[in-house]
Amino acid sequence: MDNDDYCMTEDDWLASADPDEIYLPSPSIQPERMLQFLRVHRRADNTKHGRRRLRLFACACCRRFWASLSEESREALDIAERYADGEASRKDLGYAWRISIRQYGSGPRTVDGIAGHVVEAGAMTAAALVPMVCYSVVASTHKQPHELWSEKFQQAAVIYDLFGNPFRTTAVDAASQFAAVDSIRELAEHIYQSRRFDDHSDLAMELEQAGCTDTDLLEHCRQPQHFRGCWLVDALRGIPM
């Protein structure tokens, strides 16, 4: 397949993360294409930080099914997140894979099968397989079309939260400047470590008090959903894209 097949415009990217698309006759929600765009045109799987975000994307998709996961699958998911952050070894990841595949039950396309793919050796492989299994799990209960598109949107929303708008990288540069403000950096670290993603509104207040007028940063803080690896929180923690 030619690389042009993976091209996206900024409008394509933003449409994929637009919840109003769910109810349109032909929604423009394309998480798979977003991932391939990141791989082909942004080389996301060729950098340490890109691979981290790809792994965390897979983890975030899996974590949405947390209530239905077995204890072993939950342990595997936790290990995968720690591995993404360099807090677990490849040996740990191998252990996570072994305990997760025991949970497949009737087949790999089950809720616990999602966790099995989260701990794939390659971050891009995990990022590509996990959303497909998530969709299969949702589709197996014969959802209405808008409910199936809602699953696609949730995946696209995670990608958007973790990778931002790749057509406007100035927002990341602007956020990085505020990482030097102790109160902001400490709040961002607290949000990340404690998973208090609802505290993004507090982050917006801290940014404004520090003199931030960048609408991209403030609007992103006020988005309804955020996940581990959010590009803004990472930038404020001093983690590069």
Image: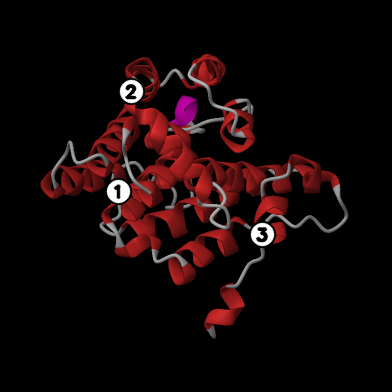
Q: CA distance from mark 2 to mark 1?
A: 25 Å
> Relative to the observer, which residue lies in front, 169 or 223?
169
Q: CA distance from mark 2 to mark 3?
A: 30 Å
Disc 1: which residue: 119
Q: Are marks 1 and 3 in contact (CB under 8 Å)?
A: no
The answer to which image quadrant residue 112 occupies is: top left
Q: Residue furthest front?
A: 211
Q: Earlier in the sequence, mark 2 or mark 3?
A: 3
Disc 2: which residue: 189
Q: Which mark is residue 109?
A: none
Neighbourhood count class around disc 1 (C-alpha, 10 Å): few under 14, some 14–19, many 20 upward: many
Query: Can the viewer see residue 29?
Result: yes
Residue 91 image offset from top left, x and y in percent = 11, 47
Q: Earlier in the sequence, mark 1 or mark 3?
A: 3
Q: CA distance from mark 1 to mark 3?
A: 31 Å
The answer to which image quadrant residue 220 occupies is: top right
Question: Is residue 68 located in the magenta-colored stretch of the structure?
Answer: yes
